[in-house]
Image: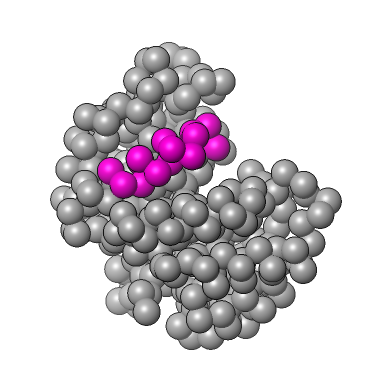
Amino acid sequence: MFKMHGIYAPIPTPFDEKGDIAWGKLETNMEFFNTTSLTGIVAMGSNGEFVTMSHDEKKDFITKVCELAKGKKHVTTGCGCESTRETIALCEHSAKAGAAAALVLNPNYYKASMKDDVLRGFYQDVADASPIPIIIYNMPGNTGVNLSANLTASLAGHPNIIGIKETSGNIVQIAEVIHRTPDDFCVFSGSSSFLFATLALGGTGGTLALANIMPEECVRIQTLVDEKKYDEAAALQRKVIAINTAVTQGFGIAGLKAAMDMIGLYGGPPRKPMLPISEENKAKLKEIFDEARS
């Protein structure tokens, strides 16, 4: 069974000014990611703007990223949809494309109905049908639905559910999940802001927006924790918090894409209705970014 460990970059989808996928830019970006110390890539995560893309676009993007990874990086794919049927279909497509695992966000439009029994049934049905392992994706900041530690612990025994990406930022909940799940259940930090804390508690890696622009620093935090050099790891963690906040809660996906442009990758515009950040905010972002890299 595939085991999640290490740092993964949830790559943005490159769009051109017309809003079409810029396939050539994706190829250039992937050439860079393949040279880094990252363990893997996530295609169609939140930073991939998957909610703005059609089912066919998602399939094409998954296929292309798996092809461009060239076996050098593990690829996990965002497969969560509002229906169980469509989620399973994307898992099946991802398996055929060569993905190692599927990252599955919970349904969330009908929030009032998304109780533990419904969500448990959703993940069990998907895991039963998926040809590749499933990673639960808890992203309450976007979905408005928090997957409780009780729910995660109850799902962790399924043979095809291998871990969780925890983006809640609730370190008590993350600690409880780590404590209540089997040793081979992988708990990933969903943000660089609490990567060190998650790893120190027994987490096994991170899927981090910041890994798109500072991959080696993100990998270094985990390496230092693995080597029990906690003071150094904590110092590096503190150093990246400001830039991570800027490209997540601060300026969002548009800010992350602008930062990618700053280091010679292609970020480009977000897909409408989201807009690029202003020139004033680009200057602020550059100042924060330069400080983090100094």
Q: Which picture quadrant has residue 24? A: top left
> Magenta-highlighted stretch: main secondary structure?
helix
Question: Does any portion of residue 240 appear in the rendered image?
Answer: no
**Is 35 situated left or right of 10 in this image?**
left
Q: How is the image coloured?
A: one colour
**Of 188 and 157, which appears nearest the observer?**
157
Q: Is residue 204 above or below residue 32?
A: below
Q: Position of residue 14 (x, y in %)?
A: 35, 30
**Residue at horizontal 30%, vertical 76%?**
227
Q: Which picture quadrant has residue 64? A: top left
Q: Is residue 263 magenta?
A: no
Quarter of the picture containing the C terminus is top left
**Of 172 and 6, which appears nearest the observer?**
6
Magenta stretch in the rendered image: 51-64
**Residue at horizontal 38%, vertical 55%?**
94
Q: Position of residue 199 (x, y in %)?
A: 45, 70
Q: Is residue 14 above or below residue 45?
A: above
**Residue at horizontal 24%, vertical 58%?**
73
Q: Is residue 268 above or below residue 247?
A: above
Q: Is residue 102 above or below residue 160?
A: above
**Is 213 situated left or right of 80 in this image?**
left
**Is 90 situated left or right of 30 in this image?**
right
**Residue at horizontal 37%, vertical 75%?**
3
Q: Position of residue 125 (x, y in %)?
A: 61, 68
Q: Position of residue 153 (x, y in %)?
A: 64, 78
Label count reads 0
Quarter of the picture containing the N terminus is bottom left
The single residue placed furthest to the right in the displayed view is: 112
Question: Does any portion of residue 28 appear in the rendered image?
Answer: yes
**Of 43 and 33, which appears nearest the observer?**
43
